[in-house]
Image (cartoon, grey):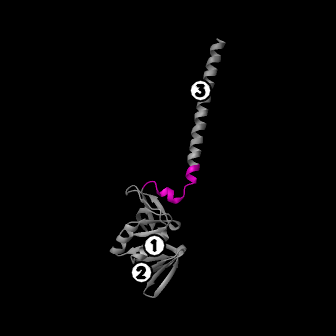
Amino acid sequence: MADTQLLKLLSSLEVQFDAAVAREEDEAASDLAFSLRQGLNLRDVLRKGAWVARHDGVERHVVLVGRDFVACSGPESVLIPLRRLVVAPSASGVHARISLLPLVETLRGLCRSGALVEVSARDLQLNGRMTQAGPDHLALTTIAGKTFVALDAIDSIRLVGGREREAASGGL
């Protein structure tokens, strides 16, 4: 009788041990997944799923993820630097295309096409034709003349007009 009770006890302990090991393995896997998510930058997050950017009180679908910016669709295309981006997952829409180009290279392409833009920079709205995209600035020809804007000051760039939108979407 004592042997039977001992076998039951050992069997019970083995089941408890197996359950504890499985629980620890699940926790370790969960911790690893959590740690890996902590190492993702926003660009990596945006590669998975469809997203909407919340900008100027409007939700716009993210259609392209560049190295340091996104392009959003809508009545006019909008470029938003990642440092100014607020996004949420979208139940509708398609996954954004991925581009290796940084914002400055994209802006240079738009300059070549003579893009008309509206630049939001802090509390300013500047309208004009893009004429230069330097490593740290953008130049516009506005009604008031030539204006230079530091890239770090830019909140968004809205492309104005059909020809420029077409040129921009083809270059992105």
Q: Earlier in the sequence, mark 3 or mark 2?
A: 3
Vertical placement of 155 versus 98: above or below? below
| Element carrying mark 1 | helix
Q: Name which quarter of the figure residue 5 lies in.
A: top right
Instruction: Tell me the amino acid under the disc marked 3.
Output: Val
- Give the Cα separation between the discs numbered 1 and 2: 12 Å
Picture mark count? 3
Q: Are marks 3 and 2 in contact (CB under 8 Å)?
A: no
Q: Position of residue 161 (x, y in %)?
A: 35, 76
Q: Residues within 10 Å of mark 3 (few under 14, many from 20)?
A: few
**Disc nearest the viewer among 3 and 2:** 2
**Residue 105 part of the magenta segment:** no
Front tag of 3 and 1:
1
Stretch in magenta: 35-49
Q: Quadrant of the N terminus?
A: top right
Q: Which residue is mark 1?
A: 107
Image x and y of residue 172, in percent: 41, 66
Circle 3 residue: 15
